[in-house]
Image (tube, rainbow, N blue to C red):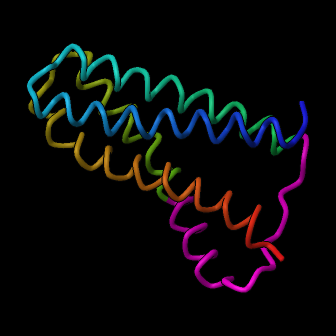
Amino acid sequence: MTKELLNYLSLITIGISGISIAVGLIFIKLKKKEIHKFFMINASVFALIFVLLYIIKSFLYPPQPYVGPYRKIFLFILWTHTVLAIINFPLAVITLRYAFKGLFERHKKIAPITAFVWLYVAITGWLIYYFLQWLNK
Protein backbone atom coordinates (compact mmCIF):
# COMPACT_ATOMS: atom_id res chain seq x y z
CA MET A 1 0.00 0.00 0.00
CA THR A 2 1.24 3.44 -0.80
CA LYS A 3 1.56 6.14 1.84
CA GLU A 4 -1.08 8.21 0.07
CA LEU A 5 -3.59 5.34 0.08
CA LEU A 6 -2.92 4.69 3.77
CA ASN A 7 -3.41 8.41 4.47
CA TYR A 8 -6.74 8.50 2.65
CA LEU A 9 -7.98 5.31 4.29
CA SER A 10 -6.93 6.70 7.66
CA LEU A 11 -8.78 9.95 7.03
CA ILE A 12 -11.89 8.09 5.93
CA THR A 13 -11.92 5.69 8.87
CA ILE A 14 -11.32 8.31 11.56
CA GLY A 15 -13.83 10.58 9.83
CA ILE A 16 -16.49 7.87 9.87
CA SER A 17 -15.64 7.14 13.49
CA GLY A 18 -16.00 10.80 14.53
CA ILE A 19 -19.19 11.30 12.54
CA SER A 20 -20.61 8.11 14.05
CA ILE A 21 -19.95 9.46 17.55
CA ALA A 22 -21.71 12.73 16.71
CA VAL A 23 -24.69 10.93 15.14
CA GLY A 24 -24.84 8.52 18.06
CA LEU A 25 -25.03 11.47 20.44
CA ILE A 26 -27.95 12.88 18.50
CA PHE A 27 -29.82 9.59 18.66
CA ILE A 28 -29.33 9.12 22.39
CA LYS A 29 -30.70 12.64 22.93
CA LEU A 30 -33.73 11.53 20.89
CA LYS A 31 -34.01 8.42 23.15
CA LYS A 32 -33.34 6.09 20.18
CA LYS A 33 -31.13 3.67 22.12
CA GLU A 34 -30.76 0.95 19.47
CA ILE A 35 -29.74 3.42 16.76
CA HIS A 36 -27.38 5.07 19.27
CA LYS A 37 -25.85 1.67 20.02
CA PHE A 38 -25.37 0.95 16.30
CA PHE A 39 -23.50 4.22 15.71
CA MET A 40 -21.32 3.83 18.79
CA ILE A 41 -20.30 0.29 17.80
CA ASN A 42 -19.71 1.58 14.27
CA ALA A 43 -17.49 4.34 15.67
CA SER A 44 -15.52 1.77 17.65
CA VAL A 45 -15.00 -0.55 14.69
CA PHE A 46 -13.80 2.27 12.44
CA ALA A 47 -11.52 3.61 15.19
CA LEU A 48 -9.91 0.17 15.48
CA ILE A 49 -9.45 0.01 11.71
CA PHE A 50 -7.85 3.45 11.88
CA VAL A 51 -5.42 2.29 14.58
CA LEU A 52 -4.42 -0.72 12.46
CA LEU A 53 -3.86 1.51 9.43
CA TYR A 54 -1.86 3.96 11.54
CA ILE A 55 0.38 1.17 12.85
CA ILE A 56 0.93 -0.15 9.31
CA LYS A 57 1.70 3.33 8.00
CA SER A 58 4.07 4.08 10.88
CA PHE A 59 5.89 0.80 10.28
CA LEU A 60 6.21 1.28 6.51
CA TYR A 61 6.81 5.03 6.32
CA PRO A 62 8.70 7.19 8.82
CA PRO A 63 6.80 10.22 10.07
CA GLN A 64 7.59 13.51 8.40
CA PRO A 65 8.47 16.53 10.51
CA TYR A 66 6.41 19.70 10.30
CA VAL A 67 8.53 22.61 9.07
CA GLY A 68 5.76 25.04 8.14
CA PRO A 69 5.10 28.53 9.49
CA TYR A 70 2.65 27.55 12.26
CA ARG A 71 4.94 25.26 14.25
CA LYS A 72 3.72 26.26 17.74
CA ILE A 73 0.06 25.76 16.79
CA PHE A 74 0.92 22.46 15.09
CA LEU A 75 2.84 21.18 18.12
CA PHE A 76 0.01 22.16 20.48
CA ILE A 77 -2.52 20.31 18.32
CA LEU A 78 -0.19 17.32 17.88
CA TRP A 79 0.58 16.92 21.59
CA THR A 80 -2.97 17.41 22.80
CA HIS A 81 -4.15 15.00 20.09
CA THR A 82 -1.56 12.39 21.08
CA VAL A 83 -2.20 12.60 24.82
CA LEU A 84 -5.98 12.52 24.40
CA ALA A 85 -5.79 9.67 21.86
CA ILE A 86 -3.88 7.61 24.43
CA ILE A 87 -6.41 8.50 27.13
CA ASN A 88 -9.36 7.85 24.81
CA PHE A 89 -8.61 4.16 24.32
CA PRO A 90 -9.21 3.09 27.94
CA LEU A 91 -12.09 5.58 28.22
CA ALA A 92 -13.77 4.01 25.20
CA VAL A 93 -13.24 0.48 26.50
CA ILE A 94 -14.70 1.39 29.90
CA THR A 95 -17.62 3.25 28.34
CA LEU A 96 -18.47 0.33 26.04
CA ARG A 97 -18.03 -2.17 28.86
CA TYR A 98 -20.52 -0.31 31.05
CA ALA A 99 -23.03 -0.19 28.20
CA PHE A 100 -22.70 -3.88 27.32
CA LYS A 101 -22.98 -4.91 30.96
CA GLY A 102 -26.12 -2.78 31.37
CA LEU A 103 -24.46 -0.44 33.88
CA PHE A 104 -26.16 2.57 32.33
CA GLU A 105 -25.78 4.96 35.27
CA ARG A 106 -22.01 4.51 35.13
CA HIS A 107 -22.13 4.61 31.33
CA LYS A 108 -24.00 7.94 31.39
CA LYS A 109 -21.38 9.48 33.67
CA ILE A 110 -18.35 8.61 31.58
CA ALA A 111 -19.85 8.63 28.05
CA PRO A 112 -19.99 12.44 27.62
CA ILE A 113 -16.30 12.71 28.54
CA THR A 114 -15.39 9.87 26.19
CA ALA A 115 -17.43 11.40 23.35
CA PHE A 116 -15.83 14.83 23.77
CA VAL A 117 -12.31 13.38 23.83
CA TRP A 118 -13.11 11.11 20.86
CA LEU A 119 -14.43 14.00 18.77
CA TYR A 120 -11.44 16.16 19.67
CA VAL A 121 -9.04 13.39 18.63
CA ALA A 122 -10.89 12.81 15.34
CA ILE A 123 -11.00 16.51 14.44
CA THR A 124 -7.40 17.18 15.40
CA GLY A 125 -6.33 14.09 13.45
CA TRP A 126 -7.72 15.74 10.35
CA LEU A 127 -6.02 19.03 11.29
CA ILE A 128 -2.66 17.30 11.70
CA TYR A 129 -3.05 15.77 8.25
CA TYR A 130 -3.91 19.23 6.86
CA PHE A 131 -0.84 20.77 8.48
CA LEU A 132 1.45 18.04 7.17
CA GLN A 133 0.01 17.95 3.65
CA TRP A 134 -0.81 21.58 2.90
CA LEU A 135 1.08 23.83 5.31
CA ASN A 136 4.34 21.90 5.55
CA LYS A 137 6.46 24.11 3.34
Query: Is 37 left or right of 54, judged from the image as shown?
Result: left
Query: Is 131 left or right of 96, judged from the image as shown?
Result: right
- On-image quarter of the C terminus: bottom right
- Residue depicted at x 77% and y 61%: 133
- Residue depicted at x 62% and y 27%: 49
Instruction: Tell me if residue 6 comes above or below residue 127 in the rendering.
Output: above
Query: Is 43 left or right of 72, judged from the image as shown?
Result: left
Closer to us: 117 or 107: 117
Instruction: Tell me if residue 124 comes above or below residue 88 in the rendering.
Output: below
Q: Percent position (x, y) of residue 29?
A: 12, 34
> Which stretch did the figure color magenta?
60-83
Closer to us: 94 or 1: 1
Q: Quadrant of residue 32?
A: top left
- Magenta includes 75? yes
Q: Quadrant of residue 22?
A: top left
Number of marks present in the image shown: 0
- Magenta includes 40? no
Residue projecting furthest to the front: 134
Q: Percent position (x, y) of residue 23?
A: 30, 33
- Residue depicted at x 27% and y 50%: 113
Q: Percent position (x, y) of residue 60?
A: 91, 40
- Residue depicted at x 58% and y 54%: 125
Instruction: Tell me if residue 47 comes above or below residue 59 in the rendering.
Output: above
Q: Percent position (x, y) of residue 24?
A: 28, 30
- On-image quarter of the N terminus: top right
